Image (cartoon, rainbow, N blue to C red):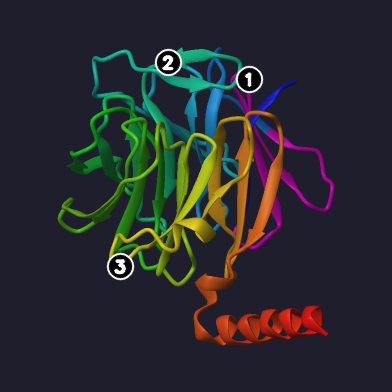
């Protein structure tokens, strides 16, 4: 069976995967057989754990905006799609569908954000799945959504070539990150919330999340693949960036500049020493 997305729980104990056959699966890393649920008849596009690993949220599979599955109890909730539009959200294999292109829980599990094919980001209350607010500003479908670790901010990417940082409490755009030449397929915050990584068409970008300034384009606007990128993210509690692309590769990078002076000074000294050795 072809897999379309994967996720690891925050505690590292579980792995989840979404399938091209509309099935979601959760494995314990200890190797027990997976727990499965059939979400729909069409390919799933994305999957993500809640922070406590009790639930997963998937997009795709049918006509729902998103589907939340408590894989331990077996309960499943489909969030209805409020949009009447047929978008271009594409699952691996080329299947286009309505609904959300991505969905993610806040760290405390109280909120769920979905990025729709209509360009609207929707925030849902996880206690009763009522809609809290909408974030309007993108000019095309929203391809990626990510909360920062505090839950105060949301980052989104879009086919409109931009990424945005939003105030969760008000729905207001705080920063717009422009510079990619085409679709931005994914977005993620660093653990400290200072940096944002975006997956452009074939380049990833690292941005100052507080100012919206693109950092040292010759260093941090980096080419990662000859194929279109599908996602980009920071590893938890580190400056490691991972990207995935449609050529089936995963690449990792060490963002030295993201570590501040504590990492920049030793790096500068090491490079200066290497230059001096080269002159000897």
- Of helix, strand and loop, which one carries label 3? loop
Q: Quick check: 231 left or right of 13?
A: left
Marks 1 and 3: which is nearer the front? 3
Q: CA distance from mark 2 to mark 3?
A: 34 Å
Label located before the other in sequence (1 or 3): 1
**Vertically, is 254 above or below 140?**
below
Residue 152: percent from left, percent from top? 29, 64
Q: CA distance from mark 1 to mark 2?
A: 13 Å
Q: CA distance from mark 1 to mark 3?
A: 38 Å
Q: Observer-nearest residue: 256 or 217?
A: 217
Report the residue at 54% width, 76% height from top: 259
Q: Quick check: 166 left or right of 7?
A: left
Residue 169: percent from left, percent from top? 19, 59
Label located before the other in sequence (2 or 3): 2
- Of helix, strand and loop, which one carries label 2? strand
Q: Quick check: 277 left or right of 125?
A: right
Q: Quick check: 151 left or right of 93?
A: left
Q: Which residues are magenta?
A: 10-35
Residue 164: percent from left, percent from top? 29, 49
Q: Quadrant of the N terminus?
A: top right
Residue at the disc numbered 1: 20
| Residue 94 shown in magenta | no
Which numbered marker is on residue 210?
3
Residue at the disc numbered 2: 97
**Vertically, is 262 above or below 160?**
below
**Vertically, is 29 above or below 231?**
below
- Of helix, strand and loop, which one carries label 1? loop
Which numbered marker is on residue 278?
none
């Amino acid at each position: 069976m072809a897999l379309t997305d994967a996720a690891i729980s925050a505690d590292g104990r579980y792995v989840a995967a979404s399938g091209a056959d509309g099935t979601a699966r959760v494995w314990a890393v200890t190797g027990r057989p997976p727990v499965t649920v059939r979400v729909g008849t069409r390919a799933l596009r994305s999957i993500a754990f809640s922070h406590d690993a009790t639930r997963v949220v998937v997009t795709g599979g049918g006509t729902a905006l998103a589907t939340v599955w408590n894989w331990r109890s077996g309960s499943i909730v489909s969030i209805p799609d409020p949009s009447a539009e047929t978008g271009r959200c594409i699952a691996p294999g080329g299947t286009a569908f309505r609904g959300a292109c991505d969905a993610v829980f806040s760290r405390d599990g109280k909120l769920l954000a979905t990025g729709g094919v209509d360009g609207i980001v929707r925030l849902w209350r996880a206690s009763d799945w009522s809609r809290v607010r909408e974030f309007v500003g993108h000019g095309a479908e929203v391809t990626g959504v990510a909360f920062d670790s505090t839950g105060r901010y949301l980052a989104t990417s879009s086919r409109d070539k931009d990424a945005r940082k939003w105030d969760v409490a008000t729905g207001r755009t705080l920063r717009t990150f422009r510079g990619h030449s085409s679709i931005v397929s994914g977005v993620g915050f660093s653990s400290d919330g200072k940096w944002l990584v975006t997956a452009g068409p074939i380049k990833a970008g690292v941005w100052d999340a507080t100012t919206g300034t693109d950092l040292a384009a010759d260093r941090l606007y980096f080419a990662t693949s000859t194929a279109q990128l599908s996602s980009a993210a920071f590893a938890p509690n580190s400056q490691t960036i991972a990207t995935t692309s449609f050529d089936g590769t995963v690449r990792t990078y060490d963002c030295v500049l993201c570590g501040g002076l504590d990492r920049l000074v030793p790096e500068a000294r090491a490079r200066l020493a290497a230059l001096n050795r080269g002159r000897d």
